[in-house]
Amino acid sequence: MDVNWWQLIILAGVGVVSGFLNILAGGGSLLTLPLLIFIGLPAVEANGTNRVAIVVQNICALRSYKNSGVLSWKIALMCALPAIVGAVIGASLAVTIDEKLFRQVLAVVMLLMLVVTTIDPVKRFRHAIQEGEWQLRWPMLLGFFIIGIYGGFIQAGVGFLILMVTMMAGMDLVKGNVLKVVVILIFNLPAVMIFAWHGQVDWLLGSVLASGNAVGAMVAARLAVAKGHDWIRRVVTLVIVACAVRLLVL
């Protein structure tokens, strides 16, 4: 497809905002998916192309997190394994979707996340997850399997779901964000391959979008560690309200 240079510039710019939002909270794909469709991609191809940027974005964020001391690879890999299985199932099913129904369901999910962040279960269940001891292991693994199916099917909003699960398990938003970055990176690798195998990835647009997402992700990762749980909770709350209103009203 033919793409104008100004469309590529806009795509990269929106990618910066999207990468920033995705690492700190979520919902960045609610900006990039409509933009890719507006540029001219079919919805399914936009869904696949967007994942190229997600993978690059999370690799860059992970590099910023690696020396922060908040990443537990043991927990991250344990969550990623069921998410991979779910993502393969979800991506394989991602052919058509009822957009109106999806927007409504996603809005409800984000509003539920708003309730969780407002209650702030971290203060109530701070010891639910500790290094070497995971009291909510099996419910969490099931949760990440379901998250993988959803994330494989359509990426938008999956970050909110992961934060909801990690907060209910007692993980603060700094550690939850790092876990989110790792899990989304890992389960999107097979998802991208499935979309690419079916010719549903535009590599040029995906690369341009990825360049913007990478910049936003690196900035957000540094802020997430520096600012801490309470600051991230405020950002998550604002993003959830804005995205939910957009999905319900527009």
Image (cartoon, grey):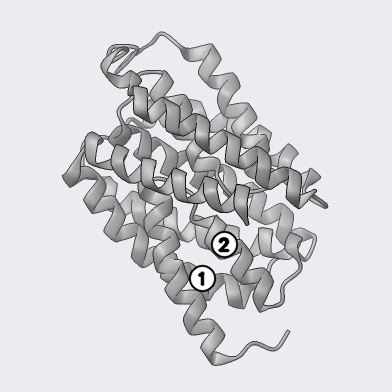
Dividing the image into 4 quarters, which one contains the N terminus?
Answer: bottom right
Is residue 246 positioned above or below 179 on the image?
below
Residue at 44% x, 33% y is 114
Residue type at the position of mark 2: Val
Classify residue 222 as left or right of residue 162.
left
Q: Position of residue 240 (x, y in %)?
A: 45, 44
Residue extending farthest to the front is: 249
Q: Is residue 224 above or below residue 213?
A: above
Q: Residue placed farthest to the right in the image?
A: 96
Dividing the picture into quadrants, the one containing residue 124 is top left
Name the residue that disc number 1 marks: 209
Q: Quadrant of the C terminus?
A: bottom right
Of residues 242 and 123, the one drawn nearer to the viewer in this rendering: 242
Left or right: 83 in relation to 98: left
Q: Secondary structure at mark 2?
A: helix
Query: For the residue carrying disc 1, how many other residues have a C-alpha within 10 Å: few (<14), some (14-19), or many (20+)?
Result: many
Q: Is residue 203 something one can see in this rendering?
A: yes
Q: Is residue 127 above or below residue 112?
A: above
Q: Nearer the viewer, residue 119 or 225?
A: 119
- Viewer-nearest of discs 1 and 2: 1
Residue 121 x, y percent position in the rendering: 34, 19
Query: Dots 1 and 2: beta carbons under 8 Å?
Result: yes
Give me the residue at 53% from left, 73% from top.
Answer: 207
Amino acid of disc 1? Leu
Task: Provide residue 67's location: percent of width, then percent of height.
Answer: 21, 45
Residue drawn at x 73%, y 64% is: 45
Who's the residue at 45% across and 61% down the image? Answer: 18
